[in-house]
Amino acid sequence: MPATRTWLKSPLAIFTANNLDARGGLVLQNGVIVELLSAGQQPTQPCDTVFDAGEHVILPGLINTHHHFYQTLTRAWAPVVNQPLFPWLKTLYPVWARLTPEKLALASKVALAELLLSGCTTAADHHYLFPEGLENAIDVQVQSVRELGMRAMLTRGSMSLGEADGGLPPQQTVQQGHVILEDSLRLISQYHERGDGAQIQIALAPCSPFSVTPEIMRASAELAEKLDVRLHTHLAETLDEEDFCLQRFGLRTVDYLDSVGWLGPRTWLAHGIHFNPEEITRLGAAGTGICHCPSSNMRLASGICPTLELSAAGAPVGLGVDGSASNDASNMILETRQALYIQRLRYGAQAITPQRVLGWATRGSAQLLGRSDIGELAVGKQADLALFKLDELRFSGSHDPVSALLLCGADRADRVLVAGQWRVIDGQIEGLDLKGLIADHSQAARELIAGA
C-alpha cells in the first residue's frame, strides 16, 4: 500500500528555523517532510490530501527542554507564592514526597496536554523524586507520553544528599547511589530509542549541586559516556547555589561541573544565570548547552540568563518552561514570548527578535537534546508541526503574522502534527477527555496538599 502524501498548502506565514523558502507549503510522507515548496510551486507528485493552510502560521513543533511534570499538582500554592528558590524548595519537598504513581500519571498528562495545546511536540522532563512507592516514576511517565502521542526526553533524576548530610532535601526523598545507577541502567536498556524519529529517550539527571553527592555526579557521567546518553542538571540558577558550592566544595559552579566530568557537549544545564565571562567561555568551548527558563527565573527572582554571550561563546541555547510550581504554566508559545521580553531588557529590542527566540524554542532546543531530526522544517526532518490561527480579537490589526504570535500573545495552537499524525485539531487534543482529566487532576492536587 503506497504511503499517503499530504500537502499543507500555502500557509499564511511559515517559520522554518533555517531561512529556507516554504511559502508554498510542505509535503509530508511517512511521518517526515519530503518537499518544501516556494510560492506558487506545485508538489512534484500528486498528493492524497491537501490541507489549505491559508489561515495558519506554521512553525516547527516547539521543543521544551526543562520541566517537572509532577509540579502541576502544586501550582500557585499560597505558602510559596512569594518565596525565592531555597525556601520555596524546603517548603515544597515534604508535599512532593507524598506523590503516588496515580498522582504522577495525572500530573504528567496535564503537563503534556498543556504543552501539546501550546504547539509543543517534544518535551524533556526532569523527574528526581522517588519516595517509597514511586520507584517506577519514569515508567509512569513513559505511559503518559505514549498516550498523548508526543516525543519526550525523560531524564532519570536523583537526589542523594539529604538534610542529614548537609543537603537541602529531606531524607525521605533521597536514594542510595547504587539504587540510582541500577535504575538508570534499567531505564536506558528498556526505553531509550536511538536515531531519527525516536519517541522516548532517557537521559541521566542528578538534580543539583545542593541535592546530590559528587560521587553520583561522576558515576552518572561515566555511565552516560559508556551508554551514549545525555546528561542534565540544574546549575547556576541562584546566588544561594553558588554560595553552597563555594562552602561545600570550595568551587564555583562551573569549576564543580568540570571536577565531576560534566563539562562537555553531552550536557545541557537548566537556568545558567550566574556565570562570569571566563565561565561562559569555558561552557562555549565545551559545547555545553543551556536551557533558558524565563518565567520561572522571573517568578523566583533568580536572575536573567546571559543568552547572547553564551551563544557567542559557542554554547547552544534552548528554552524550557521549568516546573509548573514556579512558572506556573506549561505553555511553550507563551514561554517564547516571555523570553523575547526579558531578554530585550538585557540586550535591547534590536538584538532580540521574534525569529531569534523562536529559533531557541525549536532548532536550539533540539540541539540541547542532541537531535538533528526535529526543530526545523527541511526535507528529511520529522513532520512535527504547530499551526496557529490569528483569528482572535487579540490579533485584530496585526500585520506581520510570525511576530504577531509573540507580540499579540498567542497561547494555543489550532492544529499540531507529531510524526505526520494530527494530535490537535481545532484546538482540541484527539481522543482526550480534557474535562475528566482536569477534574481528576484537581482532586489529586487537593489531596496532595491536604494537611500540609
Image (tube, helix red, strand yellow):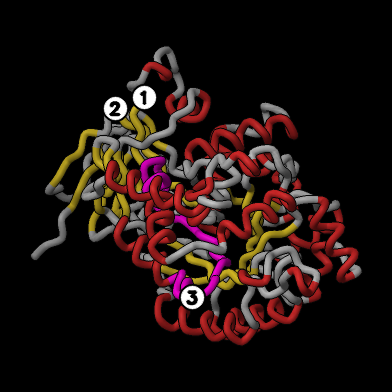
Of the residues shown, which amino acid type is indicated by label 3? Glu
Q: Are marks 1 and 2 in contact (CB under 8 Å)?
A: yes
State how far apart marks 3 and 1 are (Cα): 44 Å
Question: Which quarter of the image is occupied by the N terminus?
Answer: bottom left
How far across and how far down the image is residue 164, in percent?
Answer: 77, 73
Residue 174 visible to the viewer? yes
Q: Is residue 3 left or right of residue 181?
A: left
**What residue is drawn where x is 56% and y is 59%?**
96
Of the residues shown, which amino acid type is indicated by label 1? Leu
Q: Is residue 260 left or right of residue 143?
A: right
Is residue 114 a member of the stretch shown in magenta?
Answer: yes
Residue that badge 1 annotates: 390
How busy is the neighbourhood of tag 1: few (under 14 within 10 Å), some, or many (20 plus)?
many
Say which mark, if any, is on residue 55: 2
Q: Is residue 51 left or right of residue 406?
A: left
**Front residue of this view, candidates 104 and 417:** 104
> Which span of residues is magenta-colored?
113-138
Q: Are marks 2 and 3 in contact (CB under 8 Å)?
A: no
**What residue is drawn where x is 75% and y is 34%?**
346
